[in-house]
Amino acid sequence: MNPSTAAARALVAELVRRGVRHSVLAPGSRSAPLAHALADAAGRGELRLHVRIDERVAAFTALGLARGSGPVAVVTTSGTAVASLHPAVLEAAHGGVPLLLLTADRPHEVRGTGANQTTDQVRIFGTAVRFFADVPAPFGRPGEAADLRNLVARALAAADGVRSGDPGPAHLNLAFREPLVPDLDSGADSGSESPVEVTGAVRVDPLAAVEPVLLDDGPRTVVVAGDRAGAAAREFAEAAGHPMLAEPSSGARAGACAIGPYRLLVPRPDLGGRIERAVVFGHPTLSRPVSALLARSDVEIVVVAGRGPEWPDAGRRAARVVSSVHAGGPSRHGDWLSAWQQAGKAAQQAVDDVAAAGPLTGPAVAAAVWAARQPGEYLMTGSSNPVRDLDLAAAPSPAGADDGSVLANRGLAGIDGTLSTATGVALATGRPTRALVGDLTFLHDAGGLLLGPLEEQPDLQVVVVNDDGGGIFALLEHGEPAHAARFERVFGTPHGADLAALCAGYGVPHRRASDLDSLRAALASPPAGRSVVEVPVDRAALRDLHARIRAAVDAALS
């Protein structure tokens, strides 16, 4: 068979051998050898192939698939197609998600000559990737397939964090010469075994403790559970009896120690003002009060960062960075936890009362979506207001609940690619999935609604809180009355888009929920197939709404 076909088949065979079960392909000519090899493998049932027209959508779909199934290969042709992967690559880099980027390129002899769709793709993603190789075009030399398999093994090991404990994207830039299609009689790839086995992590970060660190019971402590903190945060908080401030996508927002609208409690002198130590799990990014807490000079910050080379410490105040912690027993500050629990319940009730009064609001929608979750379902939440509304309004789940089913792209916390990521999650897990997003997040990834008639359809319901613009800015300093003259155009950014018509163009069922009863009816059944629920809310009332919530909480705690 021709060298391009032989190399592509060897590469795909190694992906299969290494356990890759999903690949996402965007169409193109230079990547045709890989497209044919992937289609053959999918036809044999060795992996599942997903095809997307838009490379950015393809990359975010792969991101979602990888969060549910491990390393995923995403394949593009050369040129601007490669650049379109960059937003998802950055999210994967900061979120620790294993992606293998297989970008086709022109052979070295035509680079820099003005050849069509040819640009400098070498290290195009910079330091965002854990591994990079620029692979010359194959020409059929002996051992070529074995070398390529070896390279794939190294790239996958880096992407999966097998030895580093630091998963993320890896990039193979693959040059191909014509012919780019299989010979008609080329047959199947007989291949050869990979010459390398890559096994468990052996590197130890010298700044991180190897054994679990026993924390003494002196200071008044809170546990901060950021994105993907996992069950370890909840287990530590419950063992020690510490209040836990858990973001919705932490996987820890459950049990007696989880405090509801904690961001309204942290600024209070009688609660947040008495914190002496914060033990941080995961990647906390949502709350300005929590960020301020972690930057305080009078609070000891202990970061539990596992074995990766980096750790979250935006306030640059960490006193210790450890791999794991354990408590010697329940804290002697029993009144400390109970004070937070009582305040959390009172604050939760105040938030619920304000959210339930009057027309639908973002917090009310978030609370309804949170309450509608069923065991086995996934919830993907968009950045900006939706995830913060969940953080404010979602009551912690009962002990034993699986909150690892709540996901968010918090690596960089952008609005890009959320629908595609949710699609990937639903396809990888085979579970019903909901996505709670704002209207700008929805419009930013509207291309993620485009699935060809030959593609596998996920069970995905998208709930769009539509306030006709950038509602989050109304709650920041940009929304203060002093900036009202220019706010609407440069921050509010109204769009007037007809979401129903947009959904109709993509062939996705759409319904509008204008009150709580109709929203609950839309959420009553598990997602089956794809659908969009649009919930209109009033952006102009946002600052007043949150002022009323703060006042109600203050009154409840006074």
Image (cartoon, helix red, strand yellow):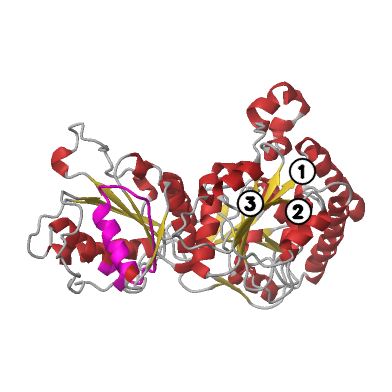
Label 2 element class: helix
**In the foreground, 198 or 58:** 58
**In the foreground, 333 or 9:** 9
Question: Mark 1 is on which residue type?
Answer: Val
Residues drawn in magenta: 13-42
Q: What label sits on residue 365 in the rendered view? A: 2
Q: Residue at x 40, y 63 (%)?
A: 206
In the image, taking residue 179 as reference, residue 531 lies left or right, namely: right
Q: Residue at x 67, y 32 (%)?
A: 494
Residue 359 shows in the view: yes
**Most extreme residue toward the top, as rendered?**
485
In the image, taking residue 19 as reference, residue 67 lies left or right, namely: right
- The percent coordinates of residue 463 (x first, y second) are 67, 53
Q: Report the Cα–Cα distance between label 1 and label 3.
A: 33 Å
Question: Mark 3 is on which residue type?
Answer: Leu
Label 3 element class: helix
Q: Is residue 309 magenta?
A: no
- The percent coordinates of residue 359 (x first, y second) are 85, 46
**In the foreground, 97 or 424:** 424
**In the foreground, 25 or 509:** 509
Say whether marks 1 and 2 touch (CB < 8 Å).
Answer: yes
Say few, some or many: other residues with alpha carbon within 10 Å of mark 2 (under 14 / 14 to 19 / 20 or more): many
Residue 260 shows in the view: no
Instruction: Examine the rendered structure and indicate whether residue 110 appears above or below residue 37.
Output: above
Residue beneath disc 1: 537
